[in-house]
Amino acid sequence: MLVTANWINDYLEEKISASKQAELLTAAGFPLEETVELPDGDVRQDFEMTSNRGDCTCHVGLAREISAATGNTLIEPVASLDASGPAIDTVTSVTNEKPELCPMYSARVIQGINVTDSPEWLSTKIANRGDVPRNAVVDATNFVLFELGQPTHVFDLDKLEGGRIIVRMAKDGEAFLPLGEGATPIKLTSQDLVIADAVKPVALAGVKGGAASAVTSETKNILIETATFNPVTVRNSSRRHKISSDSSFRFERGVSPLQIASSADRLAGLILELSGGTLCDGSIEAGQALPKLNYVTMRTDVCRERLGVDIPNEDMLQLLKPLGFDVSLDGDNITASVPCFRGDIHREIDLIEEVGRVYGYNNIPIVDDLDIRVPPFGGESDGRQALLNALSGMGFLECVTHSLIAMDAADSFLMEGQRPLVLNDERASATPALRPSMIPSLLNVRKHNADHGSSSLKLAELGSVFVIDGDTHEEHTELTFIIDADEDQGINEMRGIVDAVCSIISPDDSVSIVPSETPWLSPSGTIRLGEQEVGTIGRLASGIVSKWDLPNTVHVASIWLSTLLEQFPPINQASLLPSQPAIERDISLIVNEDVSWNDIQTCIDGLTVQFLERLLFVTTFRGKNIEEGKKSMTVRLRFRDDERTLRHDEVDGQMEDVVQALTNACGAEIRS
């Protein structure tokens, strides 16, 4: 933002040097980027301007910041008008077809002006800022823009077809010639907002005026435009046609409809002073109702806590007032009426920032020593890391993928009655669904690596998944891991990994797998930790493998961690090692394919087997000497008496009971 030191000083009672201005404005959040010494002793300064501080894209705005920081008195310009001409509605009219894009359009008319060169004071200010003086009327519009931050425009009223203004959308292919030396006609689109007369566009709204209605030395009657436009519409038109201007720079940062009237008064008064003429009575406003001022309440104790400095309540009031806030104190709460030009102030923390800025961050003491303590191990964060470390030790690669996936990928991992949570944003049109499972994200990673020659991988990811179940939005944390493995041995390997992971979370609870129906797994089971269902395990269904075009059989397990990590680490119960030896017996059973480990476990658990300490799964075998449609399952029974050494004949009878029960319940044959 280009300004000059002398111009800023016009609005300060006590004049301040250019170097001091730069120091104060840099401290206020507007760093100085460049300084140019001018022949007449003035100094042109270029300050960096953030996109949320449109109020400081002008000399009065920056002078206000200096006034607040120093206690200097701000001298704001005042307009004096004498409207002695005919009523404006007898001379022109304004139709605003797009009030949502042009919230307020204000028009004033001055008749019988005499367009001359600008006086020396005005042309000097315009030239010192780095612009080219044109004539008194055009320079007056630029002066008001750089003084108050309100873009304005002046039309030659006699060049407007029908003598009126229409705010409308352009027609596709409609021609428009912008102002400026060397400008060439452009073709507008139906996305462009324009200011038009009865026939043609005469300005690209908020961006550039048109040559067809430009003010020249022959102009006698003018229509003054003071308006505000939607920032996004202005920005899009500016980018689309590669036309930028000081007006578009300001409109893109937001202009309040509440500042239009005073700016219009200032410009009309200036033109009357410079070019004479008669101001028509009244003005025409077309748009939405004027907005009300915003009020924000700030707790003074919160302000002191956030800033880390003890600022008295009354001092806070005095810091905010020079910035234009109308403030009042009620107990320990400050309520501020936000001035219309501060569109960046919405919340309590915004007011706290203003107090801190004006107080001066350099005045806030720095604490050289910080008291820190090492937090105890535990909690969800440490639990997550413990799980990921364990998987890394087992050869898994941790993945971090995007939570947005394609709709068809999301649909493949939904249970009955569920639907994906969809992001309504055109930028995410290709991947609009929040993932209902970590599996599709990991399959995308697996496919990418397969395409680049990786034949086998172990992948894991821990993150959030989202789904709408009925009318309820559900979100939980899921740990998913996938492996490439043989069809027969994959489930065994995955079961071992699940046991290891669950032992980290809750080592005292037993892990069991209960057969279940999961659409994307075949076969599939539900993982139980104690009595709680905590996830799913299984082989990826052939349809899913084909959809992702994966080269190998993939086995998957997902564990829901939302409540499991709350008490991490678990309280481990230490116990003495057994003092007596155990006797272990293996049984190899030939059973039908549909007999599961859970069936065998349930059968044996239902018996009263004396001295039985633990039942273990050993292996499953299919192949030579095993009839098709059957499999051999080996289980191990561990017997122990805590008081003495068992004899083998004491176990033989128990084993006979177990074999008989398995033969009856599961149709098992004992493999010799």
Image (cartoon, grey):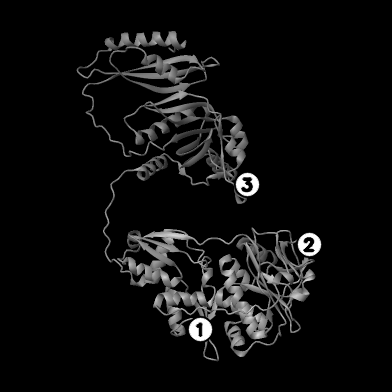
Q: Position of residue 44 (x, y in %)?
A: 53, 83
Q: Quadrant of residue 366?
A: bottom left
Decide which of 404, 226 is in the foreground and name it: 226
Say which quadrant the C terminus sits in: top left
- Which mark is drawn over residue 173? 2
Residue 415 vertical placement versus 252 (above, below):
above
Q: Earlier in the sequence, mark 2 or mark 3?
A: 2
Q: Is residue 360 visible?
A: no
Q: CA distance from mark 2 to mark 1?
A: 46 Å
Pointer 3 residue: 430
Which mark is nearer the camera, 1 or 3?
Answer: 1
Residue 635 vertical placement versus 163 (above, below):
above
Q: Position of residue 222 (x, y in %)?
A: 71, 77
Decide which of 533, 641 is in the foreground and name it: 533
What is the residue that sits farthest to the bottom in this orientation? 40
Q: Is residue 571 visible?
A: yes
Decide which of 499, 632 is in the foreground and name it: 499
Q: Position of residue 27 (x, y in %)?
A: 42, 74
Q: CA distance from mark 1 to mark 3?
A: 55 Å
| Residue density around tag 3, few if under 14, some if 14–19, many if 20 or more, within 10 Å | few
Q: Earlier in the sequence, mark 2 or mark 1?
A: 1
Q: Earlier in the sequence, mark 1 or mark 3?
A: 1
| Residue density around tag 1, few if under 14, some if 14–19, many if 20 or more, within 10 Å | some
- Left or right of 113 in this view: 7: left
Type of residue at label 1?
Asp
Say which quadrant the N terminus sits in: bottom right
Decide which of 420, 585 is in the foreground and name it: 420
Q: Quadrant of residue 578?
A: top left
User: At 23% across and 29% down in the image, what residue appears?
Assistant: 575
Pointer 1 residue: 10
Q: Are marks 2 and 3 in contact (CB under 8 Å)?
A: no
